[in-house]
Amino acid sequence: MENIRFRGPHLGILAVIFTALFLFGLSYVITFTAGAPHFPSPYDSASAIIAYFREHPHDALMCACFHFASAIPAGIFTVTAWRRLKWLGVRAVGPSIALLGGILVTVALVSTSLIMWAMAYPGVADDAGVIRAMYYMSFAIGGVGYSVPMGLLIAGIAIPAGFMGLLPRWLVVFGVILGVVGETSWLSLIFPGLVMLIPLTRFPGFIWLMLAGFMLAKRKAASTPGLTTEVG
């Protein structure tokens, strides 16, 4: 039977849009200029955290808006990747694990960006106790609340794609490593020194999603009746 074309968004383009929106939002709060105001870490003093949101609400607001926007292509990428792997003939549980991880990533992005939006709202930063509590909640959701499910999303795609030869071995290994790093990042809740596992999942994860997205988008399903029923 002749191949039937997969009907759905392009995975690679979705990953690029997701990455671009997230990084553009991050550009408002991250600076590499010495002495310039920077988004506080949870290990900064309480006064530094409060001062940032009192003095730079616009930067926090713009970051929140673009990160909220990035959740949409992230969610669409997740559903499309799940559907495409099924269409390509994957019958293992991996795509469903990826679906769970991607949905949780999307929820984390929406939640943390809305909390930050509230933190940037006029007058909120005047209450020191409230702004600190909201900041720590935002950091937790956008930190391990993002990196752990991102590890599930990547590993859930990489492992079954590796078994079926849908992705090159080096990219599969890269994905498995990112999955392990992402899952291990939850330990940063107990051991603060492991907080670097969060960006080690986040930023290489962007690269992995774009590479895997473009490669999977080129794959065609086998010409069998059992696979053509997965089109949609």
Image (tube, grey):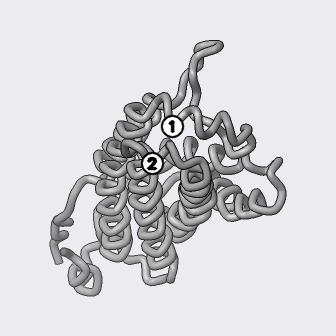
Residue lying at 47% horizontally and 69% vertically, measured from the top left: 104
Residue lying at 65% horizontally and 58% vertically, measured from the top left: 182
Which quadrant of the structure image shows residue 223?
bottom left
Identity, as a three-letter code, of the amino acid under mark 1: Phe
Q: Nearer the viewer, mark 1 or mark 2?
A: 2
Identity, as a three-letter code, of the amino acid under mark 2: Val
Q: Is residue 48 left or right of residue 103?
A: right
Q: How many marks?
A: 2
* Residue placed under numbered mark 2 in the picture: 124
Tell me the SS state at disc 2.
Answer: helix
Precedes in sequence: disc 1 or disc 2 = 1
Q: Nearer the viewer, residue 1 or 20?
A: 20
Tell me the quarter of the image containing the N terminus: bottom left
Residue 29, percent across and down?
49, 31
Residue lying at 50% horizontally and 82% vertically, measured from the top left: 93
From where the camera sits, is residue 172 visible? no
Q: Nearer the viewer, residue 65 or 73?
A: 65
Work out which residue is located at the far top of the displayed protein and give it.
34
* Residue placed under numbered mark 1 in the picture: 53
From where the camera sits, is residue 221 visible? yes
Q: Is residue 141 above or below residue 231?
A: above
Question: Circles 1 and 2: CB distance less than 8 Å?
Answer: yes
